[in-house]
Amino acid sequence: MAQQLTRLPFDAANFTQGGVRVLIKESGKGFRFVGHIREPNLEAMLEWYQHYNASAGKEALSYEAPTKTGYKAAFKADEMLSENLKRLFFAADPTDVAADAVATAAAETVTAGKTGALHGIDYGRQTVAQRAALAVYNVTDSALLVANTDYEIVTQYGLTFVKMLVDTHAGDTLRIGEGLTASSDYHYTKLAHKLIKPLTVLSLEVGALLQFPAIKGVNLEWRIWRASIKPTGMSWNSKEASSLSFELEVIDDSANHPTSPFGEIYDYGYDDAGAAVI
C-alpha cells in the first residue's frame, strides 16, 4: 500500500472529496494559515482573440490566441484572526494597546435635545465612580446643570449617556467633562486591544500556498510566487459562523520564475491505504 500517482479513468479512487487550506506569506514573514475556509472557488481569467474566415461562404474559426491570462481564488475565512481583520480593512499590522483603568479624554460639547434625548460621550466605557465624576455645563447660559433634575447619567450596553430630563436647555450648547464648569478631562476605562487603522494599506502583495487535502481521492498543492489579496466583504452573523470574504489573484512572476510564472501545482495523487498525503 502506497501513494499512487498514476491513475486510470473509470476508477472510483479518482473521485475526490476534500477541503482547502490557505497559507499567506507577507514580506518578511513566514507562511501563516488563514484558518478555517468555506466555499473555496477557483476561477480562470482567460480572454481570447478569435479570428473568423468567411472565404468559403460562411464564417469559420481560423485562428485564436489568448489576450489575457490569470487565475483567481475566492474563499471565506471563518476565523476572526488579527491578520484576517487587517486584510479586511486594508490596514497595516495591528498595534497592541495596553489596558488603562484611568484613561482621560478632553471634555466634549453637544447641542442639548429635548426631554429624553440621549447624548453619548466619545469614550463611554466607565466605572461607576467615573460616571459619578461627570459634570454637565450649559455653555449658552453659563450655568452648571443639576444632576437628576436637568439630566441623569444612564448606561446602555455598558456605555455612558447623558439623558435630558427637561426641555429647558433644548438647543443650548452643553459641555460634558469634570469640574465646576465641566472643562476638565473626564476619565474612562480603556480595555486592552489590538488597534487596526483601516484604509492605510490599499495594496498587499503576498506569496500563497493553497493545499487541497482529500479524505478520498486526489491531493493537490499550488505554490504561488506572487499574488494580491483583496477583501470582498464581511458577513457578521448570529445564525452561523461569521465570515470574511477574500480574493487571491495570481500575479505573473516571469522575472523570477520564467518557466512557471504563475506558480507550480503539485499532484500528490492519493494513498491507496487511505492515509493522509498532505
Image (cartoon, rainbow, N blue to C red):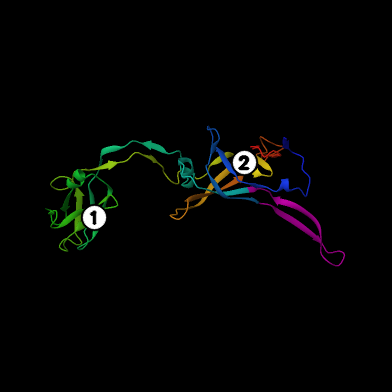
Count of picture labels: 2
Query: Within 10 Å of the Cα at label 1, are there few (<14), some (14-19), or many (20+) other Cα atoms?
Result: some
The residue drawn where x is 49% and y is 50% is 243
Residue 227: image location, x then y, percent: 59, 42
The residue drawn where x is 73% and y is 51% is 66
Q: Is residue 194 left or right of residue 68?
A: left
Q: CA distance from mark 1 to mark 2?
A: 55 Å
Q: Is residue 50 magenta?
A: yes
- The quadrant where residue 190 appears: top left
Query: Within 10 Å of the Cα at label 2, are there few (<14), some (14-19), or many (20+) other Cα atoms?
Result: some
Observer-nearest of 83 and 205 = 83
Residue 95 visible in the displayed image: yes
Observer-nearest of 189 and 263 = 189
The residue that label 1 is drawn on is: 110
The residue that label 2 is drawn on is: 211
Q: Amino acid at mark 1?
A: Val
Q: Is residue 214 left or right of residue 120?
A: right
User: What is the magenta range?
Assistant: 45-71
- Element at label 1: strand
Q: Amino acid at mark 2?
A: Gln
The residue drawn where x is 78% and y is 58% is 51
